Image: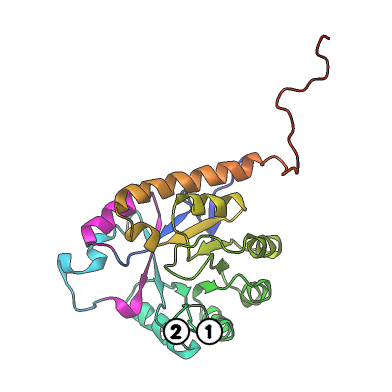
Amino acid sequence: MQDKPFQIAGRAFSSRLIIGTGKYPSFEVMKRCHQASGAEIATFAVRRLDLSAKGEASMMHWIDRDQITILPNTAGCYTAEDAIRTCHLAEELGMSKWIKLEVLGDEKTLFPDLEETVKAANVLVKEGFTVFPYTSDDLITARKLQDAGCAAIMPLAAPIGSGLGIRNPHNIRLILEAAKVPVIVDAGVGTASDAAIAMELGCDAVLMNTAIAGAKDPVRMATAMKKAIEAGRDAYLAGRIPRRAYGSASSPIEGLIA
């Protein structure tokens, strides 16, 4: 099967890995990870950005805007109104009208508030934002976000930063079957095999931060994630063999001389 470019909101990208900017030991390590990952989209929390920082003290100094499209996010918001205000702030600062929408509902699990997320998405799309919503692996909410005009659906694999991997691949498959926009797994990836599984399911891309930034060797993990995304995509396109309850000989016995 011939692969197609990763297209989202009218733009094509070579990489199917989207990377974060938080939790790195330093901005220099962050930049090296971005380069090693091959990612072309990077997300960052608008509310946690030090707007007073200048030069090398500013995170934005370390992001190559010629190579990377920035995706401001509304991390830390717990109401639709707060998320919408944060998006307006990003626009006023000249960052981007591409927005990763996060409206959290629980401080411990960091699960999204689905009602508030859909509410914010409807407003932001009407205001001309290109919305990438973080959501649960819930099919009904995914449909509502798609109907609202979101550019993608971004279901979690597991709680943010947990590293638990894809807890419910069945729900991800249901979303993939119904989706008419790209599906991007967001949150919960812990290692390269998790990223490969997401791609083998047929997801269009994977967004991650902690799995790379929190690794003992972040740059090497960024490289591993790049390879995993590519391998998982190739495996999906190749088409896996059916699962069987019993063995099936690799060398058929039919036609053998007695």
Q: Which residue is at a point 52% across and 42% down the rendered structure image?
A: 231
- Distance of mark 1 from mark 2, alpha carbons? 7 Å
Task: Identify the secondary structure beneath mark 2.
Answer: helix
Q: Does residue 1 appear in this view?
A: no
Which badge, 1 or 2, is on the more N-terminal residue?
Answer: 2
Q: Which residue is at a point 24% across and 62% down the rendered structure image?
A: 25
Circles 1 and 2, Cβ within 8 Å, touching? The answer is yes
Start and end of the magenta stretch? 24-49
Where 140 sits versus 217, above or below? below
Q: Which residue is at a point 70% across and 64% down the rendered structure image?
A: 178
Which x, y percent locates residue 205?
Answer: 52, 56
User: For residue 147, which quarter of the picture?
Assistant: bottom right
Image quarter of the N terminus: top right
Q: Which residue is at a point 25% across and 67% down the rendered structure image?
A: 59
Under mark 1, the amino acid is Ala
28 inside magenta stretch: yes
**Outermost residue to the top:** 257
Task: Compare residues 5 and 139 and report the one nearer the observer.
Answer: 139
Task: Compare residues 78 and 39 and report the one nearer the observer.
Answer: 78
Where 240 sits versus 103, above or below? above
Which x, y percent locates residue 95?
Answer: 35, 72
Under mark 2, the amino acid is Ala
User: For residue 119, which quarter of the picture?
Assistant: bottom right
Q: Which residue is mark 1?
A: 120
Task: Identify the secondary structure beneath mark 1.
Answer: helix
40 inside magenta stretch: yes
Q: Which residue is mark 2?
A: 83
Image quarter of the C terminus: top right
